[in-house]
Image (cartoon, grey):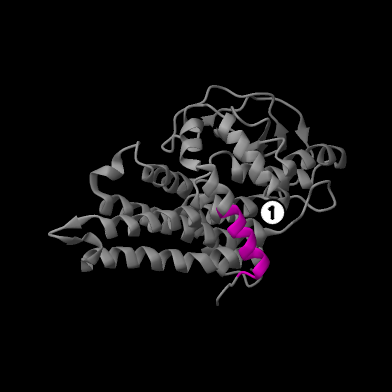
Amino acid sequence: MRFLLDAGQRAFAASLDALLTAAGTPAVVRDWSRGDHASGRALWSRVAEAGVFALAVPETYEGGLGPLPVELAVAFVELGRHAVPGPLVETVTAAVLLTGADPGIAKRLLPVLASGETMATVAPEGAYALDGDAATLRLSWEPSGIRLSPGHGPALPCLDPARRLTPLAPGGELLDAPTGQALTWARLATAAQALGVGLALLDRTVGYVRQRTQFGVPVGSFQAVKHRLADAKIALEFARPLVFGAALTMRPADAAAAKAAACEAAYSTARTALQLHGAIGYTAQYDLSLWLTKARALRTAWGDPHECRALVVSAAGDRRW
């Protein structure tokens, strides 16, 4: 099945691409990695003004446009393509969680999430939260429910320097908020982001092998190189319909399948990109590293491949999915 975006969705993707290209995201990512959030917050505000976070907020709340999961997937592909830093998936997940919370809390918090005024992070109990030092709303996902964490511990290093991990402080107000579809939204957004990361890695690698020469000819003319790039392209193109198919159905197993496929495709593309770039691909000063490390980190975010595949296999025996 072919999932083709309509004219409005294509225009939305193009506008985000133009916005993020002009923003010079590699410099923003490096600032964020050092704990300097000023440029990242400015970019966050522009992304919010484009309506990205409002897509997860019901239109019954001020500033909300959603729920629009297909448009959200379109947006997150572009966010991944440009390696935008920050708790993007977590803010969307927080919006979905708060939609089912007490109406007073939802009315207070959802509009500021949609507008970008508030940056949120969410973490299961005992796990590290992404960018807890930058987020102004921190939610701890516990067996008893969702708790508003009062603070956070020191930021810890991560494989992806732009993903700063922080422990959340215990205690805080317990919200009566059913988790519902929150994990499905988190996995869909992560899958779309990973797809964008993989596409960026492929584009950059194709450009590089066209310019790099060996034995007097471009490296990209070698058959072995073409095969590696073709394998990466096929994996990403197979993942794409799973991502948009999951956005249409919003079934947990479909989102898990999309996440497994997109994250594995991005990770495989990252390995290909690193091999074809050679030693320069290892250097943190080279922009390729910003996408390489993100592909690896997203692979295990919100459920590793084994966990997602197990859900797909389990659901395959249930005709209801």
For residue 135, side relative to residue 279 (left or right): right
Identify the image quadrant of the C terminus.
bottom right
**In screen coordinates, is 246 left or right of 282?**
right
Q: Secondary structure at mark 1?
A: loop
The magenta-colored residue range is 5-17
Disc 1: CA contacts within 10 A as few (<14), some (14-19) or many (>=20): some
What is the quadrant of the N terminus in the image?
Answer: bottom right
Q: Nearest the camera: 113 or 218?
A: 218
Viewer-nearest residue: 317 or 16: 16
Majority secondary structure in the magenta region: helix
Circle 1 sits on which residue?
Answer: 181
The residue that appears at 27% across and 50% down in the rendered structure is 277
Q: Residue furthest left?
A: 215
Q: Is residue 161 above or below residue 97?
A: above
Q: Is residue 8 magenta?
A: yes
Establish if 114 lies above or below 194.
Answer: above
Apparent side of residue 219 relative to residue 26 in the rendered image (left or right): left
Residue at 60 percent across and 68 percent down: it is 245
Residue 211 x %, y %:
27, 56
**Left-right relation of 207 to 299:** left
State whether residue 35 is above or below residue 269: above
Q: Residue furthest bottom?
A: 1
The answer to if 247 sits in the magenta stretch is no
Q: Is residue 206 visible in the rendered structure shown here?
A: yes
Question: Along the line of sight, which residue is nearer the eye, 97 or 71?
Answer: 71
**What residue is drawn where x is 22% and y is 69%?**
223
Q: Amino acid at mark 1?
A: Gln
